[in-house]
Image (cartoon, rainbow, N blue to C red):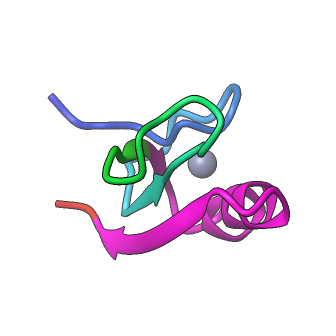
Amino acid sequence: MTDVCSAKGCQAPAAWELQWNNPKLHTPDRRKIWLACDDHRQSLSDFLGARGFLKDVVSHR
Ligand SMILES: [Zn+2]
């Protein structure tokens, strides 16, 4: 089973893990994970970054 990108409608295999936290919903040490392919890493990171939610981006295997 291959993990796929979290972007809407995208079926590409995930290459990246976007680790994020919404301080209004989550305790500070909690991490939510979005998976992203190479094509969507930037747009998903920008979405989370613009809201101040993005904590880390690491490679996914
Ligand atoms: Zn994608």
Left or right: residue 11 versus residue 48 is left
Q: Nearer the viewer, residue 41 or 9?
A: 41
Left or right: residue 4 versus residue 11 is left
Numbered marks: total? 0
Q: Position of residue 61 (x, y in %)?
A: 16, 60
Where 13 falls versus 25 (above or below)? below
Q: Nearer the viewer, residue 15 or 11?
A: 15
Left or right: residue 40 versus residue 50 is left
Q: Residue furthest right?
A: 50
Where 58 falls versus 23 (above or below)? below
What quarter of the picture does the N terminus occupy?
top left
| Quarter holding residue 7 | top right
Q: Nearer the viewer, residue 44 or 40?
A: 44
What segment carries the magenta color?
34-59
The reply to whether the magenta stretch includes residue 3 is no
**Residue displayed at 54% across by 36% down:** 6
**Residue displayed at 52% across by 48% down:** 21
**Residue displayed at 73% across by 63% down:** 52
Q: Position of residue 42 (x, y in %)?
A: 70, 71
**Residue displayed at 36% across by 47% down:** 31
Q: Position of residue 43 (x, y in %)?
A: 77, 61
Left or right: residue 27 versus residue 22 is left
